[in-house]
Image (spheres, grey):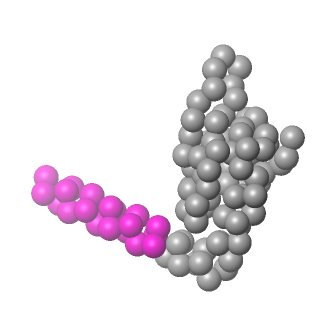
Amino acid sequence: MSSVFKDMDQDDRLDALERKVKKLERNVNGGSKMSGIIKELIGRECTIDGDGIYGHSCTILDADDEWVKLIVHEKKSDSTMIVRLDNIDSITLD
């Protein structure tokens, strides 16, 4: 049983290292430029495609170097989501 917990710890460490590497890559490859572009879109209606969001109409509320805060407009109700910039594939302005 203890080996399962060791594996979980190693998986958690690996995930943390992967996040750090992605952050470094983003900083080197102009990730701050992307967040700057998204900051210009605050308050605008758009459609965002990425992990967990496909073709939903959204309003961008706030953005920083790693995260974007959105209101996702769904048929029955609106929901607020916070999404990592790495998880966004494309943004289409409505």
What residue do we see at 33% from left, 61% from top? 12
What residue do we see at 32% from left, 67% from top? 13
In the displayed structure, 62 sits above or below 24; it is above
Comparing 12 with 93, the one in front is: 93
Residue 10, picture quadrant: bottom left
Comparing 47 with 14, the one in front is: 47
Q: Position of residue 5 (x, y in %)?
A: 19, 56
What type of secondary structure mainly makes up the magenta span? helix
The magenta stretch is 1-20
Q: Is residue 70 rendered magenta in the image?
A: no
Q: Position of residue 60 (x, y in %)?
A: 69, 45
- Left or right, residue 9 beside residue 55: left
Q: Is residue 56 visible?
A: yes
- Quadrant of the frame with the C terminus: top right
Residue 79, picture quadrant: top right
Q: Position of residue 15 (x, y in %)?
A: 40, 64
Q: Position of residue 17 (x, y in %)?
A: 40, 72
What residue do we see at 83% from left, 48% from top? 92
Q: Is residue 49 visible?
A: no
What residue do we see at 56% from left, 56% from top? 67
Q: Is residue 16 rendered magenta in the image?
A: yes
Comparing 81 with 60, the one in front is: 60
